[in-house]
Image (spheres, grey):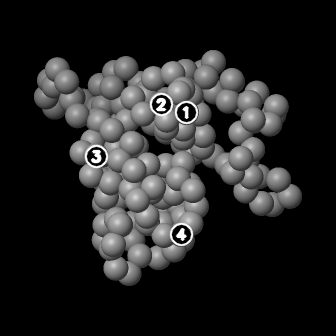
């Protein structure tokens, strides 16, 4: 299975509206994406199941292709797929360039804008500081993606977020 995702933010008067996902036009867009086979992060919980307010990733739309990775990428398969492959951890082609070192509680030299991006992506309060709440939300995201839930945003997690 290959997952492709995009994150989007409603914009009004040239400004991001981070709490604008309940607007009727945005809900209509989300419903259309769901009709096409996307899942919406606003419906997730910490286990990736129906929403229970535990983990919400409103900017996230994800499409999962139930086929071979090589088939999607347009090349011939070189080996038999594993029975239970580990989900992708990013391919290094993030939209936002990785800051070059892991971000976590207590890390030195983090840029506020990078921490804010992470907080928005995982649904944490945007404070600009990598705090315990951010660490908890990152861990929930990692669990959702079936990754090691250590609360650290390294290259692999960065690439799945952005």
Q: Earlier in the sequence, mark 2 or mark 4?
A: 2
**Horizontal side of residue 137 vs 40, given as left or right:** left
| Residue in view at x 57 percent, y 56 percent | 125
> Helix, strand or loop at disc 1?
loop
Please give the residue where the numbered disc 1 appears in the rendered image: 53
Q: Quadrant of residue 116?
A: bottom right
Write the residue at 51% across / 57% down.
119
For marks 2 and 1, the one nearer the N-term is 2
Residue 137 versus residue 85: which sits nearer the camera? 137
> Is residue 125 in sight in this rendering?
yes
Foreground residue among 9 and 6: 9
Which label sits on residue 158? Answer: none
Query: Is the residue under label 1 in contact with that under label 2 (CB below 8 Å)?
Result: yes
Find residue 7 and report its horizontal and vertical position in percent: 57, 45
What SS does tag 4 mark? loop
Identify the residue under disc 4: 128
> Residue 29's image quarter?
top right
């Amino acid at each position: 299975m290959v997952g492709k995702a995009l994150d989007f933010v409603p914009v009004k008067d040239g400004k991001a509206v981070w709490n604008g996902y309940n607007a009727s036009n945005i809900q209509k867009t989300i419903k259309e994406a769901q009709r096409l086979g996307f899942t919406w992060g606003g419906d997730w919980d910490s286990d990736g199941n129906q929403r229970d307010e535990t983990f919400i990733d409103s900017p996230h739309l994800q499409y999962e292709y139930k086929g071979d990775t090589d088939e999607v990428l347009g090349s011939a398969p070189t080996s038999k797929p594993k029975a239970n492959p580990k989900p992708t951890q990013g391919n290094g082609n993030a939209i936002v360039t990785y800051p070059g070192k892991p971000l976590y509680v207590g890390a030195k030299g983090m840029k506020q804008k990078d921490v804010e991006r992470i907080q928005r992506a995982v649904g944490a309060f945007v404070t600009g500081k990598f705090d315990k709440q951010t660490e908890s939300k990152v861990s929930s995201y990692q669990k959702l993606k079936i990754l090691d839930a250590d609360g650290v945003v390294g290259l692999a997690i960065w690439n799945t977020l952005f």
